[in-house]
Image: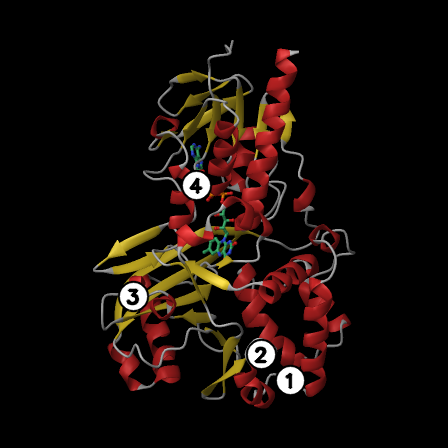
Amino acid sequence: MAHTQDPVIIVGGGIAGLACARRLNGRGVTVQVLEAAGRVGGRIKTDRKDGYLLDRGFQVLQTAYPEARRVLNYQRLDLRHFAPGAMVHIRGRFYSVADPLRRPGALLDTLVAPIGSITDRLRLLRLACRVTRGPLDALFRQPESTAMQFLLAEGFSDTMIKRFFVPFFGGVCLDPKIRASSRVLQYVMRMFALGEAALPAGGMQQIPLQLAADLPMACLRTGTRVGQVRSDGVSLDDGTVMPARAVVVATEAPETENLLGLPHSGRSVAEACLYFSCDQAAWHPSFLMLNGEGRGPINNIAFPSRVSSEYAPAGKSLACVVVLGNPHGGDAALVDRVRAQLVDWFGPQAGNWVHLETYRITHALPDQSPPTPNPTCLVPRVRPGLFFCGEHGSLPGIQWALVSGRLAADAVLDHLGDLLI
Ligand SMILES: Cc1cc2nc3c(=O)[nH]c(=O)nc-3n(C[C@H](O)[C@H](O)[C@H](O)COP(=O)(O)OP(=O)(O)OC[C@H]3O[C@@H](n4cnc5c(N)ncnc54)[C@H](O)[C@@H]3O)c2cc1C
């Protein structure tokens, strides 16, 4: 039986759980975040190694995320931006594909890039304008198909789809067949069109650290795995029972479904992320670089140290390579295959790039193929006293994790208010 002095327990200290805790704490509710790992942040983590900052998986903050704009202090995050657009590697060279309104200097290169016809480019411009109009939630009320079906129906050529949309949107959803929802595609395009892809100067982990900094230290307990949840408390893996006024499950979707005893709603998609250090800082562009040919293991590559110099020691560059899925074979074989492609793209000197780390992330994101839920109107209540936030019942991504944390906190506040009546 829970008492009024018991805390609201939040299971999971990723950004959804932290956003929920912060909102409840701000309303004077005592919270206790129980996090299984040794640090908060969940899937947004940055390791320090030999003076490099290694984000666990390539991630960016889109500055246009409406909830992130509300909740995060961008100035204190000291955001650094990627160049708008991308470079696509086709037939032995990189072509820049940039928004001509935001980067007029790249217009000529964009026009000559063999990514499709002039009609394709006009279609892209028209689609980019269309997805920025109207309220965001309207995008999630549209009829839904896979991104591939949507792009074909919009009239895009095979070349444009294969050389641009597959590496670009496949890299965002970690889905090389771009079977993810057409709604997600339009939402992603809207975020790219309205803002910039950014990294906090000190690494992506600055995002959860900023959220956690607003909470009293005693609210956060790491190294604590929850085994069972009820409306009035939780049991830890070591058998300890902790009573709670309410419980919010803020874990990744498969674990939320385990803890709540729900059927698994979808499969996970994976990525491998490999980091290399190299010397030629000067020419590495701050563009995201895409594989426009679909050959070889690499889907995309970025040089985070060109965006924020804190990612690498002075005089060095950091390369971050993304391979979609969970590539077969051991890590050494994967490094060899990636290195061979780096040499093909960047010349023989890439053979000397020093491999720093390989991260294999098996549940990076849930699969986002249709049907997908509308993340703007999540109902985060299982039953009185038991709530959830995070990607279960919603969509993955920083924007939706923060939204779900807020909605769960508001549902808890309603519940606590009801108890007082
Ligand atoms: C490789 C990769 C690339 C991505 N790229 C982007 C991007 O570019 N832009 C973007 O917006 N989003 C991106 N995302 C998605 C984004 O990082 C996630 O959607 C977001 O961080 C999820 O936050 P969360 O709090 O919902 O879940 P999580 O971060 O998964 O947090 C859940 C927490 O619960 C803890 N936990 C699990 N089980 C238990 C238990 N039993 N007891 C206690 N604690 C438990 C976990 O340890 C974890 O800390 C990417 C994710 C990955 C992995």
408 to 67, vertically: above or below: above
Identify residue for label 1.
116
Instruction: Work out how far the residue at label 4 is from the one at label 3, CA to CA, in angstroms.
Output: 37 Å
Instruction: Work out how far the residue at label 4 is from the one at label 1, CA to CA, in angstroms.
Output: 43 Å
The amino acid on which the numbered mark 4 sits, given as a three-letter code, is Leu
Residue 332 image label: 3
Residue 386 left/right relative to 148? left
The amino acid on which the numbered mark 1 sits, given as a three-letter code, is Gly
Identify residue for label 4.
211
Local secondary structure at mark 1: loop
N-terminal of the two: label 3 or label 2? 2
Local secondary structure at mark 2: helix
Residue displayed at 57% across by 37% down:
406
N-terminal of the two: label 3 or label 1? 1
Locate residue 57, reporting x and y percent.
Answer: 41, 57
The amino acid on which the numbered mark 2 sits, given as a three-letter code, is Arg
Report which quarter residue 413 is drawn in. top right
Instruction: Work out how far the residue at label 2 is from the one at label 1, CA to CA, in angstroms.
Output: 8 Å
